[in-house]
């Protein structure tokens, strides 16, 4: 039995769980409050930045990825990388359909990119 | 390992694995492979949302104003609480606490999950039905004069809202089913500090559903354009 002990997974202290929980609650209050302040296009950036931070807290601590093996981490990173490919290529198609590169050059892409926010 | 007699194996240990650590990693890895498909499943909706919001922002802003932030924010808090109780249920198993404590945290998680669905169905969706802003001819979606030419895109926003939150709610219902099975398994003494993989990977699923909502809340309730009055 001795060789099996110590392999039952990392036990996260309750204090870390409670800290993460409080950080998530503060993040929720922050993202709600900031939405009522007009920051123009930066509202979208701030809201997504808070959402990504909250996601990382859940993934690293609640989902134990901070203590996971390299193999598991690679699979998770691949998943988000594929999500990035899907969103980027879909946007690259849709948003550049009205883009006349010969008429306006590369700067002409900026109005299309800004529309995302 | 071959010299091990059957009674020396930890409970729940399957013979094809070298040791419990390898078994645990295989379970976690397999669950994440499934969650990656879920990321891409929801990701398709998020990609569509990003593109149509960029094309029809004015309609999406009006649509976002139709939603009530107080319900969205409350439900976010409820789900975060349920993630904490789920994590504590797993920790109770890890640290060898009795089955009573594990069941207590699991049932608390189920109560919070049910509260989320209760708020969504009886307040939000019911109000949307009463106000005629549920898309589809059967629910009598009505254009309002003040929407003007943006009306079709307000309807499109409400389609995104119902499909995204509806799919999320469906995942919540499945999660409640999984939790019910876990409560039964715990009551039958299936788990110990040596073996609690079903709790661990079900926890991954529950936290994943929480993460989807963490993105749905700002995307639908807030950055649809709440701040651009």
Image (cartoon, coloured by chain):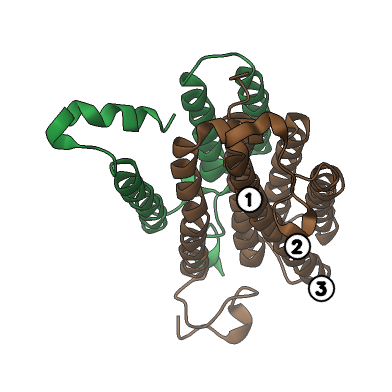
Chain colours: A green, B brown
Q: CA distance from mark 2 to mark 3?
A: 14 Å
| Residue A98 badge | none
Q: Is residue A111 visible?
A: yes
- Mark earlier in primary sequence (3, 1): 1
Q: Which comes before the other along the chain, label 2 or label 3?
A: 2
- Residue at 81% x, 54% y: name it: B110
Query: What residue appears at the point 76 percent right and 70 percent down from the top-left corner?
Result: B181
Disc 1 versus disc 2: nearer the observer: 1
Q: Residue furthest left?
A: A102
Kindly identify which chain the residue marked by label 1 belongs to: B
Q: Which chain is disc 3 placed on?
A: B
Q: For marks 3 and 1, give the CA distance.
A: 44 Å
Q: Are marks 1 and 2 in contact (CB under 8 Å)?
A: no
Q: Return the chain for callout 2.
A: B
Report the residue marked by disc 1. Answer: B159
Which residue: 63% across, 39% down?
B151
Q: Secondary structure at mark 1?
A: helix
Residue B76: percent from the left, percent from the top?
Answer: 70, 38
A65 or A1: which is nearer to us? Answer: A65
Q: Is residue A105 visible?
A: no
Image-based side of B201 in relation to A68, left or right: right
Residue annotated with mark 2: B179
Label 2: element kind: helix
Instruction: Look at the picture and state if B202 lies above or below A25.
Output: below
In the foreground, B15 or B47: B47
Q: How would you rate the neighbour count of disc 2 (Cα within 10 Å): few for under 14, some for 14-19, many for 20 or more? A: many
Q: Earlier in the sequence, mark 1 or mark 2?
A: 1
Q: Is residue B25 left or right of residue B203?
A: left
- Mark 3 highlights which residue? B188
**In the picture shown, does residue A48 fall above or below B177?**
above
> Dividing the picture into quarters, in which one does residue A62 lie?
top right
């Amino acid at each position: 039995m001795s060789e099996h002990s110590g392999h039952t997974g990392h036990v996260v202290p309750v204090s870390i769980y409670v800290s993460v929980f409080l950080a998530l609650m503060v993040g929720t209050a922050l993202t709600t409050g900031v939405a009522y302040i007009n920051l123009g296009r930066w509202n979208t950036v701030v809201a997504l930045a808070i959402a990504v931070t909250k996601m990382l807290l859940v993934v690293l601590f609640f989902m134990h990825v901070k203590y996971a093996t390299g193999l598991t981490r690679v699979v998770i990173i691949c998943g988000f990388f594929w999500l990035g490919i899907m969103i980027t290529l879909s946007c690259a198609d849709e948003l550049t359909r009205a883009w006349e590169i010969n008429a306006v050059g590369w700067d002409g892409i900026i109005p299309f990119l800004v529309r995302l926010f | 390992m071959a010299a091990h007699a059957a009674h020396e194996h930890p409970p729940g240990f399957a013979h094809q694995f070298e040791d419990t650590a390898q078994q645990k990693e295989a379970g976690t890895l397999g669950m994440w492979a499934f969650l990656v498909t879920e990321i891409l499943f929801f990701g398709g909706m998020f990609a569509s949302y990003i593109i149509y919001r960029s094309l029809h922002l004015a309609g999406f802003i009006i649509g976002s104003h139709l939603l009530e932030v107080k319900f969205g924010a409350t439900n976010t808090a409820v789900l975060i609480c349920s993630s904490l109780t789920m994590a504590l249920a797993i920790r109770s198993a890890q640290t060898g606490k009795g089955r009573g404590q594990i069941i207590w945290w699991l049932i608390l998680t189920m109560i919070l999950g049910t509260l989320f669905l209760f708020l969504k169905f009886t307040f939000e969706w019911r109000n949307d039905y009463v106000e005629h802003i549920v898309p589809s001819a059967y629910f009598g979606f009505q254009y309002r004069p003040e929407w003007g030419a943006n009306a079709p895109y307000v309807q499109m926003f409400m389609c995104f809202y119902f499909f995204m939150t509806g799919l999320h709610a469906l995942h919540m219902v499945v999660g409640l089913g999984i939790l019910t099975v876990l409560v039964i398994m715990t009551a039958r003494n299936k788990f110990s500090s040596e073996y609690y993989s079903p709790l661990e990977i079900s926890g991954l699923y529950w936290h994943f559903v929480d993460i989807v909502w963490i993105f749905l809340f700002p995307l639908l309730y807030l950055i649809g354009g709440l701040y651009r009055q």
